[in-house]
Image: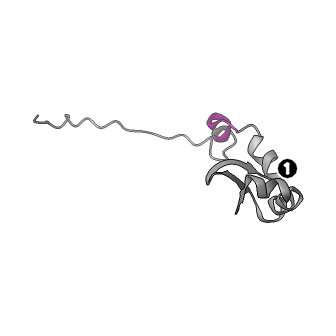
Amino acid sequence: MAHWQIQEAKQHLSEVIRLAQADGPQMITYRGEPRAWIISDKEYTKLSQEKESIVDFFQRSPHREIELDFERRTDPPREIFL
């Protein structure tokens, strides 16, 4: 990951874009503080895809038909002294 000052990034925009595609995200800084990132279209597509819900994830499981028998403990709660 490279760091580019904003003026330098303006002057070398083509190179910044090429490096984003080849080497990964490129950070743009202003007065030493991170301000923006240049990422490849492939990375953007991956990040912007809708995420699968946890319910859908478990419904796709090959083990979804297994019945689990959970036993609840009958021990009394422990005493806590405050």
> Where is residue 48, by image quadrant?
top right
Please indicate whether residue 11 sits to the left or right of residue 2 in the image.
Answer: right
Viewer-closest of 64 and 54: 54
Q: Which residue is pictured at 82% across the width and 53% down the height?
A: 10
Q: Name the one closer to the observer, 14 or 22.
A: 14
Of all residues shown, which one is farthest toward the right? 14
Q: What secondary structure characterizes most of the magenta part?
A: helix
The three-letter amino acid code for the residue at tag 1 is Asp
Whole-percent x and y of residue 4?
Answer: 72, 59
Residue 45 left/right relative to 69: right
- Please name the colour scheme applied to the rendered image: one colour
Magenta-drawn stretch contains 39: no
- Asked whether 57 or 12 is in front, the reply is 12
* Local crowd size for mark 1, using a 10 Å CA cut-off: few (<14), some (14–19), many (≥20): few
Q: Which residues are magenta?
A: 52-57
The vertical placement of 42 against 3, above or below, is: above
Q: Position of residue 45 (x, y in %)?
A: 81, 45
Q: Is residue 63 above or below residue 11?
A: above
Label 1: element kind = helix
Tell whether 19 sits left or right of 4.
right
Residue 22 picture location, percent across and down: 83, 65
Q: Quadrant of residue 3?
A: bottom right
Considering only vertical position in the picture, is 22 above or below 78?
Answer: below
Q: Which residue is mark 1?
A: 41
